[in-house]
Amino acid sequence: MSSQHFLSQLNQIEAKRICIIKPSALGDVVQTLPLLPVLRERFPDARISWIIRDSFANLLEGHPHLDEIIPFSRRSSVRYWWNFLKELKQRQFDLVLDLQGLLRTGIMTAATRARWRIGIEAAREGSHLACNLTIPDTGRLVPAYLKYWRVADAMGFGETQRQTDIYLSQEDTLWAKNKLSRLDNNSPPTLAIHAGAQWITKRWPPESFAAVGAKAIRRFRCNVVLVGTADERPLTNHIEKLLHKFVPTGHVINLAGETTLKQLAAVLIESDFLLTNDSGPMHLAAGLGTPVTGIFTCTNSLRSGPPGDQHQLVSTNVDCAGSYHKRCPKRGPQNLCCMEELEIGRVWQALFRLVSNHTSQGNVKAA
């Protein structure tokens, strides 16, 4: 379908019940959030729902442009799945946006029987068959944040500012402030470190993170806060021990496994910088305005990195860089060679530029 034809079709839509289908992952959910104000502007009287994995639902709570959160359990029985699809049909959606583009979300889209079912060109596993419209220029090579923003473009709102709104309670904000108050309040800036990632091919070594964190403590007197999931706690424990070994006088706290998603967001807001692998927390921090140094091994910084020139993104130079392999394609001594090739010095220089640029401009948050 041509762009002109798609736009003419889109302009005909009058929807009272809208559903975004974007269950995961965290980074993709964060990058989809700026669409909510756009949909509200385009359809001011519509009821807007969002299907999301239950583990991420907390992030959407309280959003003023979202009327309903529909949590979805990935590990579910056939009976649960059947009832879930039945409920989607009963909601009588007029417009459904499948921004995931996988078999599971394609089945959800088809089950709604909505008149307007819109998908993306990057859709896989036959999910495109459930859609009757496809957003142009949304193939797999298009940067992720732009892929979702094409919906805004198509609706005539592409020039508006992207807003990543996450609504935090006073309790969430106070929780983060209280946790970070254990650091040296006379020694800004605060550097958050997220060394986890879902794929092993994204995980730069914890020893390397510790080495860069130690340099930041020595050079900038940084406070360090380690963040991650409960499953990543052994990883952050290892980094914490190394940091205390390298810089015994450094101030480090380990919050991995202790935060809800909103508490994590509050911690990232309170932090001045984030050093991270390509991960959901990277996009969460960037969306909330916290500058990041992002490390890219098996993924591509242009396709998967956050927008904006306030970040420092560092990529490996091995021949399979940006190949998006969940398992390393190399065997023997070359297995995960990208981790060694992406040297500590390169990442440190990127973080050094990030911190130096912002401190010189007076952009470090007050203690």
Image (cartoon, rainbow, N blue to C red):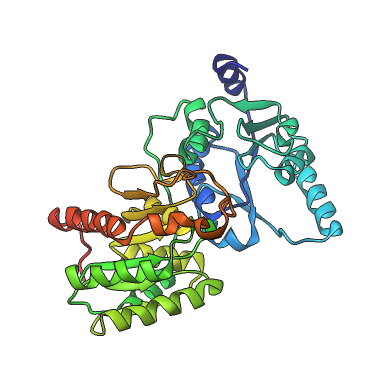
Q: Is residue 132 above or below residue 207?
A: above
Q: Quadrant of the C terminus?
A: bottom left
Q: Residue at x 64, y 61 (%)?
A: 54
Q: Residue 14 appears at what percent x and percent y? A: 63, 27
Q: Residue 340 appears at what percent x and percent y? A: 40, 59
Task: Give the left or right position of residue 303, taking residue 366 as reference.
Answer: right
Task: Give the left or right position of residue 352, taking residue 75 as reference.
Answer: left
Q: Residue 30 appears at what percent x and percent y? A: 49, 50
Q: Is residue 45 above or below residue 86?
A: above
Depth check, front residue: 148 or 90: 148
Q: Is residue 257 visible?
A: no
Asked where in the image residue 293 lies, by quadrant, the reply is bottom left
Q: Give the residue furthest to the front.
A: 333
Q: Residue at x 32, y 61 (%)?
A: 344
Q: Is residue 67 above or below residue 159?
A: below
Depth check, front residue: 317 or 198: 317
Q: How many marks?
A: 0
Q: Quadrant of the N terminus?
A: top right
Q: Residue 201 appears at what percent x and percent y? A: 52, 56
Q: Residue at x 45, y 59 (%)?
A: 281
Task: Give the left or right position of residue 333, taking residue 132 as reference.
Answer: left
Q: Is residue 318 above or below residue 248?
A: above
Q: Is residue 264 visible?
A: yes
Asked where in the image residue 327 lies, by quadrant, the reply is bottom right
